[in-house]
Image: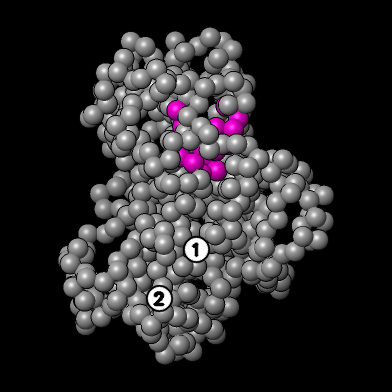
Amino acid sequence: MTVNNARDAEPENQYDIVIVGAGFAGLYQLYKLRELGFSVVLLEAGGDLGGIWYWNCYPGARVDTHVPMYEYGIEEIWRDWYWSERFPSWEELRAYFNHVDNKLDLRRDIAFNTRATAARFDESHNEWLIDTNRDRVYRARFFVLCTGFASKPYIPDIPGLERFAGECHHTAQWPQEGLDFSGKRVGVVGTGASGVQVAQEAAARASSLTVFQRSPCLALPMQQQKLDRKTQDEWKKDYPERFDNRMNTFGGFDFDLLDASALEAGEQERNRKYQELWDAGGFNFWIGNYIDILFDERANDTAYKFWRDKTRPRIKNPATAEKLAPAEPPYPFGTKRPSLEQGYFEIFNQNNVELVDIRNDEPIEAVTETGLATSRKHYEFDVLVLATGFDAVSGGLTGIDIRGRHGGTLKEHWRDGLKTHLGVASAGFPNLLFLYGPQSPSGFCNGPSCAEGQGQWIVEFIKYLRGKNIDRVETTGVAERQWGQLVQELADMSLFPRAESWYMGANIPGKKREMLNFPGGLALYLQKCNESAAKEYEGFEFG
């Protein structure tokens, strides 16, 4: 623990609020809180705006939410912004954040290349002392963490990984200058969203591509399309209504789960609806589908079989088809976040692409100086891509040495399971608020929708505290237990616990297996938050 004494923070480093993270959530907090007259600074570990879109610059990286849902609903920003594609690339997302800054002038209050490494609550002054990698200490009344659900990359403990002599990068730690796959022998470990996207790019350029799969990825067709200004000008007539409606849906989109049963629909009607959702692309087939596919195994099976029968004919080799789209579901459809693909399954028909099943056929044994060894053979590579995911949802918070009023860390507080109230605060950590994190809808929700929905609630909460001259707020253990019980009850009603997914913390060795997100959807979540606010922020104690 390296945080200095409370009075060691230089006067110019004293603020009402310190925010961490320059993604959608953090920038929204900065914009709104600054508007209210608070003195605010935002600490960002990366070199520019965008949060995950600063780090996500691997080949093929693009958002899996369609526009205009994947942007702020602030008219000043969207009125003269135009996208080139329905699902924009990382390059276009960076241009968008520059546009946001041009409109809102955010950079002047952001410290880039500044990572919050530790924080301590100073009870004598009801303030947080935040230490950074740049030997600067910041002091603030409120500490607002917007680290996102995918900010701490997970690199598995593969023997010999440090010995590899070629290029080896996690997709979330990709070289900013880029990396050309042309003529290279490429290995990709992992088949989640980034693995699918990298593999699609590498297959077109690499001399050889080997994809190491642990679990089949039940990827959905992206249905990408080019966009022109005329089309978007027509859309913009309805933008205010579309943006408002996001908050009334499960996933924060402009569509919602169908209030109908897949089992009650006749087979012909059900398949007609499935085809309609399939053609719509994106996440429509996932969280625009019949509501019972997430709660009833028999209903879920009908969705899986439709997906399987659409996918297998695209794969020429029957053995490969069985690995990629098994006859029987490897886990309930939708209980792992589906990736969106553009020709992913077809790459395995190419002579330069090989699929290796590391769960059932060839477990990885070691990385060598020249490649990767499985139980059956050694593969030679020039480039090794680790698409191995994240210590999701909680990892970005527990990666900071945050110590509350009793001196214990947030990581210790959550050792035996997450404890939050409304997914925004934890007992023993006064004046600490976090967004898009544990026990909030984060992993199931469109990022900008959460940034604005949950984010506005946080802004109003801090505004309320100032209006009441309250300089210390903390949630209670009772409120934590009640919220955790609700999260668990909702999870137990669903099929999500049936999958070994990052939703359940199952991808990180030693991490407690539990539902990390609020699985009731954004609309219900905001309802619960607003109920607390209407009762003078029930579940919090003030001092």
Q: Residues within 10 Å of mark 1 (few under 14, many from 20)?
A: many
Seen in the picture, residue 55 relative to 531 is either above or below; the reply is below
Residue 478 point in image, percent of width and height: 41, 23
Q: Which residues are magenta?
A: 18-33
Residue located 45% across and 28% down the image: 18
Q: Which residue is mark 1?
A: 61
SS for dot 2: loop
Looking at the rendered structure, the kind of residue marked 1 is Ala
Q: Residues within 10 Å of mark 2 (few under 14, many from 20)?
A: many
Q: Earlier in the sequence, mark 2 or mark 1?
A: 1
In the drawing, what numbered circle is on residue 181? 2
Q: Horizontal placement of 522 versus 187: left or right?
A: right
Residue 383 point in image, percent of width and height: 32, 73
**Which of these two is toward me, 212 or 294?**
212
Quarter of the picture holding the N terminus: top left
Residue located 68% across and 53% down the image: 68
